[in-house]
Amino acid sequence: MGQAAAFWIMAVVIVVAAFAVIFLRNVFRAALSLILCFIAVAGIYITLSADFLAAVQILVYVGAISVLIILGIMMTREVQKGSPVNKMQIPAAIVAALLLGILVYVVTSTPWSISSQAPLTPTTMPLATKLFSENGFILPVEIGAVLLLAAILGAIVITREK
Amino acid sequence: MAIFDSALIQPLAMQVTPPDWPGGYWWHWLFFTVAIIAFVLIMVMGAIYLERRGMGRMQSRLGPNRTGPFGLLQPVADAVKVLLKENIVPTTADKIVHWLAPVVAFAPVLVIFAVVPFQNGAMLADLNIGILYVVAVSSIATVGVFMAGWGSGNKYSLLGAMRNVAAVVSYEIPMVLAIVGVVIVSGSLSMNQIVTGQDIPYILVQPLGFLIFFIAACAEINRSPFDLMEADSELTAGFHTEYSGMKFAMFYLVEYAEAIAMSAIIATLFLSGWRGPWLPPWLWFIIKTFVVFFVMVWTRTTLPRVRIDQLMGLAWKFLFPLALINLFVTAIQVVVWPDISQWIFVIVNIAIAAVLILLWSKFFKLGQGRVEV
């Protein structure tokens, strides 16, 4: 009962916040609703007994990514009130519609397997074993980190003044 | 009584009440929520008194001593004064954001105390991810500062908020790396288990980690010498320039509650929390918290404010490499010699810390060495 109530509250908050991100004209407020959305997603993780994931969600998405988004907004002129004029509206709309279609198709057509077992309660240890033990996921994670580093360096090189 | 059966209601893995605790989950929740709010408010008043009187002593003046015996009622008088003031909102402000900012800044600080153990098991929630939860939740407070800086519609507020976020993002990295050192040694993320595992206070086992964490914590909560996000001579009052009355009181409260929270976390992680001889555990905890806070006041009165390039340079060129080396050394010690006495590591780690700090301060340069430090 309690979990169902929590789920529905979080779900409504997530959907409303996500719509607010799209429809608010004020970019700063849109970023704030994005933060609310991230926090509510962390709430969903808690109801799924994924406490470690919930904390990491808050730490990474709210503490780092949203803050950088807001910093980006503050550093940029003229986007603060409403979106700037853009010539690429139609291509952007096509790409967005395609992406939405693919996502909806994938989500609806995937047979989601539901486990009837009770969830592991301390999730930290199993996650660490998955990551660091033999045949663990350490190599993909490291490759992902190197990729992100390369992206950051690329962004710095592109935007640096000559 | 099924409704009080904590196993049914509580989805999180939580080692709830001590066995002699009366009632159940909801009583536990109510008791600790009220206790935490009272604790934070009273500790903040104590901290304000300690800071103002202590700073007075250190600066060869008296400090506030007129209100009540020894000036003890000064924080109360200040609170009453600030609550009775007019609430002014600038016309260019984003009203909703301006109004919400103090709340968003205050809530995370209060929530941190949910996992701080006052005694063995005496806490709102003994989460098994305790310290990670603290790091995650305290990162939300930045959003409140941002909202205040943006919502005020004032360039000084905005500049203060941007300096704040630059400092928080930079200092979070050495801080978390220092925490990881403690977590490796104790083998647990739960705050209570970190305390119960501390037969030797981790300030001795992890001296370098302690110093890094202390410096980074001071920078995170904008305490002098890192308080240039509210440097009065440059930015009026930083992000809360446009706040008055009750809302300003909230930010003032946040500032001291954050300092108390960081002191409590340092006491828990490095000074063996509630453990100690003779006195009751909760009293030990409060004493240790105040001792750490006193050292913060001490550094504030001793050191001048740093410049922005010094702030960034210290985080990235000094604390970050040292934190990495500390983590590496700790990991090797735990993996290779898990069974030998911790006292050997105490001596070795203090020596390593001293050598590293001396070596790094020799090579620490700013602006390719053109700027004198």
Image (tube, coloured by chain):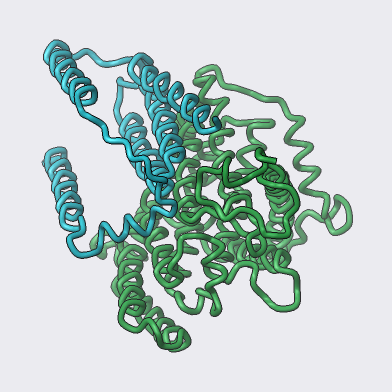
- Say if residue A33 shows up in the picture: yes
Q: Quarter of the image holding residue B277?
A: bottom right
Asked if A132 appears above or below A160 in the picture, the reply is below
Q: Residue at x 18, y 21 (%)?
A: A105
Q: Is residue B169 left or right of residue B110?
A: left
Q: Position of residue A143 (x, y in %)?
A: 14, 52
Q: Quarter of the image holding residue A129?
A: bottom left
Q: Quarter of the image holding residue B335?
A: bottom left
| Foreground residue among A95 and B213 | A95
Q: Which chain is cyan?
A: A
Q: Is residue B313 left or right of residue B158?
A: left
For the view shown, which residue lies furthest in the right direction? Answer: B69
Q: Quadrant of the N terminus of chain A?
A: top right
Circle count: 0
- Say if residue B152 shows up in the picture: no
Q: Residue at x 42, y 84 (%)?
A: B345
Q: Position of residue B289 (x, y in %)?
A: 64, 63
Q: Residue at x 68, y 59 (%)?
A: B19
Q: Position of residue B360 (x, y in %)?
A: 32, 74
| Foreground residue among B126 and B154 | B126
Q: Colour of chain B?
A: green
Q: Position of residue B96 (x, y in %)?
A: 53, 21
Asked if B39 appears above or below B93 in the picture, the reply is below
Asked if B331 appears above or below A35 in the picture, the reply is below
Q: Quadrant of the C terminus of chain A?
A: top left
For the view shown, which residue lies furthest in the front direction? Answer: A116
